[in-house]
C-alpha cells in the first residue's frame, strides 16, 4: 500500500533529552511541551519565534492547561498546579509517594476536564506503572494497573470510547468510556503495530476522528483510521525518537511534533543532531482544541 507521506520541518532546535506532551493553547496561540528528564516546561510563540524555558525543578511527566488559567503538572512528586505569572507551584496529591523508583509519564485532559496521567518505573519494570485520573485537587482514581510505559491517550469524537497506548504492548487499545463518571471497561485491541525497533508513543485525535501516533525509534508519525484499522497518512522526520504530537496554528492544521535523544551516544547524536528538537508539518487535516482541566 502506497501511503501518502510528507516531511516535517524543524521549528526550534533543542537538546531535549525526552521531549514530550505538546499542548496547543488556542487562547494565546502558544505551544507548550516538556522535557521530562531536564524538568523544563517550554512555552513557544510561533508568531515571534520566541521560546520561554521554565525550570520546574524536578522531572515533569506531563502537562495540561487549566480552565481557570495556569496549568496542571504531573511531577515526580505528584500532581501540582502551576501559575505562569508568579511561577508558583502548588503541590497537591501523590498517589505513588511510596514508590520512589516511579515517575509520571504522558498525560492529557478528557473532554469533561479530568486530567489523566500514567506512571512507570525508571528502569521500565514490566507492570510497575498505573493510570490515574484527577478530577479535583484532592480527588484521584486509579483507572488501570500493571502498566509498563503508559503513553498516548485520546477520546472518540462521540465520547463513548477511550483510546490508550502502553508502548511495550505495541497496541492501541480501546475501552468503553462513560463520560459522566469517567469509568472505562471492556478493553479490546484496535490496532497492533509490527514487531520492530519502533514503539507507539504519544497520540492525538483529529477532527475526523482519526488517530495520529508518534513512533519512538520509527522516524515518523502515522495517521490511523480507527474504523478500518489502516494507516492512511504519515509524516516523516529526520530523527528517530519521535515522542508525541498535537495540532495547532490558526487553522488547526499544523502538526507539532516532539522528539528526544534519550540513551543516544555522542556519535549517534552527531549523525542526527536535530534529535530533541521541535518539528512541525502542515497537513491536509485539522485537529481539535485541547481539553482543559476543570478542577
Image (cartoon, grey):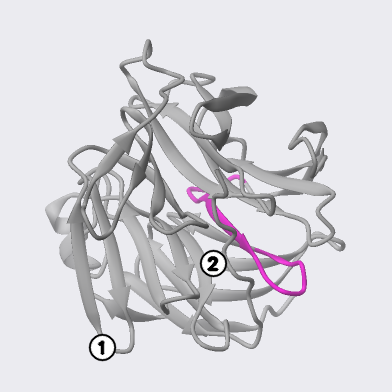
- Estimate the x, y position of residue 218 in percent, counting from the top left: 47, 59
Frontmost residue, 234 versus 257: 257
Q: Quadrant of the N terminus?
A: bottom right
In magenta segment, residue 209: yes
Q: Position of residue 90 (x, y in %)?
A: 31, 37
Precedes in sequence: disc 2 or disc 1: 1
Q: Which residue appears at 74% of the width and 37% of the height?
A: 182
| Residue with the mark numbered 1 | 48
Res. 14 in view: no
Give the labeled residue for mark 2: 221
Depth order, front residue of 99/278: 99
Which residue lies at the image location 40% right of the left edge and 52% below the top edge?
Answer: 71
When the figure is inspected, residue 253 is found, relative to residue 55, above or below; the finding is below
Q: Is residue 206 above or below residue 267?
A: below
Span shown in magenta = 195-211
The Cα atoms of the two marked residues, 2 and 1, are separated by 27 Å
Amino acid at each position: 500500500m502506497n501511503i501518502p507521506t510528507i516531511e516535517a520541518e524543524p521549528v526550534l532546535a533543542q537538546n531535549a533529552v525526552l521531549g514530550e506532551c505538546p499542548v496547543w493553547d488556542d487562547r494565546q496561540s502558544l505551544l507548550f511541551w516538556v522535557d521530562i528528564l531536564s524538568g523544563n516546561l517550554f512555552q513557544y510563540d510561533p508568531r515571534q519565534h520566541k521560546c520561554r524555558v521554565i525550570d520546574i525543578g524536578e522531572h515533569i511527566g506531563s502537562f495540561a492547561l487549566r480552565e481557570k488559567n495556569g496549568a496542571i503538572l504531573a511531577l515526580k512528586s505528584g500532581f501540582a498546579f502551576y501559575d505562569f505569572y508568579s511561577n508558583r507551584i502548588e503541590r497537591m496529591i501523590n498517589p505513588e509517594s511510596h514508590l520512589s523508583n516511579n515517575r509520571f509519564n504522558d498525560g492529557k485532559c478528557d473532554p469533561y476536564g479530568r486530567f489523566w496521567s500514567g506512571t512507570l518505573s525508571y528502569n521500565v519494570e514490566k507492570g510497575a506503572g498505573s493510570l490515574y485520573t484527577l478530577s479535583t485537587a484532592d480527588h484521584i482514581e486509579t483507572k488501570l494497573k500493571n502498566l509498563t510505559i503508559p503513553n498516548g491517550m485520546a477520546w472518540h469524537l462521540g465520547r463513548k470510547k477511550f483510546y490508550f497506548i502502553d508502548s511495550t504492548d505495541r497496541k492501541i487499545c480501546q475501552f468503553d468510556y462513560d463520560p459522566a463518571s469517567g469509568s472505562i471497561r471492556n478493553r479490546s485491541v484496535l490496532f497492533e503495530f509490527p514487531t520492530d525497533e519502533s514503539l507507539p508513543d504519544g497520540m492525538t485525535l483529529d477532527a475526523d476522528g482519526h488517530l495520529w501516533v508518534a513512533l519512538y525509534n520509527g522516524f515518523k508519525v502515522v495517521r490511523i483510521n480507527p474504523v478500518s484499522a489502516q494507516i492512511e497518512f504519515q509524516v516523516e522526520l529526520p530523527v528517530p525518537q519521535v515522542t508525541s504530537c498535537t495540532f495547532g496554528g490558526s487553522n488547526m492544521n499544523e502538526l507539532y511534533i516532539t522528539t528526544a535523544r534519550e540513551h543516544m551516544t555522542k556519535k549517534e547524536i552527531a549523525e542526527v543532531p536535530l534529535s530533541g528538537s521541535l518539528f512541525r508539518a502542515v497537513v491536509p487535516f485539522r485537529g481539535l482544541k485541547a481539553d482543559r482541566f476543570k478542577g
